[in-house]
Amino acid sequence: MSEIKGLMLLFSLLLFVVVIDLVRRKHLREKYSLIWLLVPIVLVVLSIWPGLLEQFSRMFGVYYPPSLGFIAGLMFLLIITLMLSVVVSHHSTRIIALIQEQASLENRIRKLESDKTSNQKPIKSEK
Amino acid sequence: MKNKKLLIIIPAYNEEGAIEKVTDSIKKHLPMADILVVNDCSTDRTGEIVAAIPGVNLINLPINLGIGGAMQTGYKYAYENGYDYAMQTDGDGQHDPAEAAKLIKEIEKEKADMVIGSRFLEKTNYEQSFLRRLGIIIFEFLIKILIHQKVTDATSGFRIANKKIIKKFAEYYPSDYPEPEVLVYLDNAGLKFKEIPAEMVHREHGKSSITSFKSAYYMIKVIYSLLISKIRGI
């Protein structure tokens, strides 16, 4: 086994363990972890069958197989960061709505409390 | 203004020096209106000062949302409390409440769903730099192409809206630099707006939210938002 192959397998194993552990400790949600588990699986498959990458390269007309690996990795990272930007945008929309709702509730509570303390008059119904 | 509920929305971020003057002036000129100050997580005493003003409603945002998020908070409040009209003004005294009466009169004619106070429809006292004027001309041109309506002061934050628009804004309101984008959003929804001339004074305290460093970004962001809003449809 070549050294690089051993290194790849070790790295894959490490990544796999780290991702699983993050999910276990609830630092990473299952939903977002699956795509990261895909990475070590693909790396392991490619290190066990090095012919696979060469076959794919020939299929796409790439002369230097590792460059196919680079471009695939780069595309994967681009897609994953785009997905994360979508998630972040979605979250900021939801956080804004939550903040507004919280502030509006705080306003209502303050009004109710001041109505109650000031001369015990009945709470004004809001229409 | 008989039997109609009007809410004045004042988004305020660090306006401790001006806010009380603004609310006092509104109370004096528009006694029939309810006033809501949306304190956008000010770091100064804006919240405390407003809380002590009798007859003024205060919403404290726990996190700074920027003008769009703060304004929408006001519109959501107006929607939930069944207001017929909501007027937005600046918290820094730039908009003269005496001028607000004109806006109210115009919206009551029910010919438009939103009325905008424009600094440039007639010659007013408002002064501005050449660059600012250039930006405004570009917006005017782009909006004219996108919605086939001439808008002389797309960035004016001096506006009054009816129930239909209050509902629309409670659903969605653009986040940063919202004023021009809102126009395309409303046009998409088939709602009408019109401009009337309004005098505005120079800000007494604080600074405009748009500094010279940010103005290039501002232009690009607004143009981009206008175009996106157009292709978004509704």
Image (tube, coloured by chain):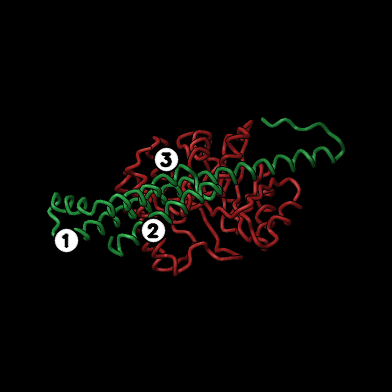
Chain colours: A green, B red
Crowding around mark 3 (Cα neighbors within 10 Å: few <14, some 14 to 19, many 20+) is many
Q: Report in which chain the residue with disc 2 lies.
A: A
Tags 3 and 1 on a common chain: no
Which label sits on residue A10? 2
In the image, residue B227 sits, relative to residue B203, either above or below, namely: above
Going by the numbered disc 2, the residue's amino acid type is Leu
Corner quadrant of residue B35: top right
At horizontal 14% and vertical 56% (from top left) the residue drawn is A62
Marker count (numbered): 3
Residue A100 percent across, percent down from the top left: 59, 44
Measure the alpha-carbon separation of dots 3 and 2. Answer: 58 Å
In the image as oriented, which residue stretches furthest toward the right? A119
Q: Nearer the viewer, residue A90 or A58?
A: A58
Residue under numbered circle 3:
B186
Residue A32 percent across, percent down from the top left: 44, 46
User: Mark 3 touching mark 2, by CB under 8 A?
Assistant: no
Crowding around mark 2 (Cα neighbors within 10 Å: few <14, some 14 to 19, many 20+) is some
Tell me the mark number nearer the camera, choosing from 1 and 2.
2
Residue under numbered circle 1:
A64
Q: In which quarter of the image is the C terminus of chain A?
A: top right
Measure the alpha-carbon separation of dots 1 and 2. Answer: 24 Å
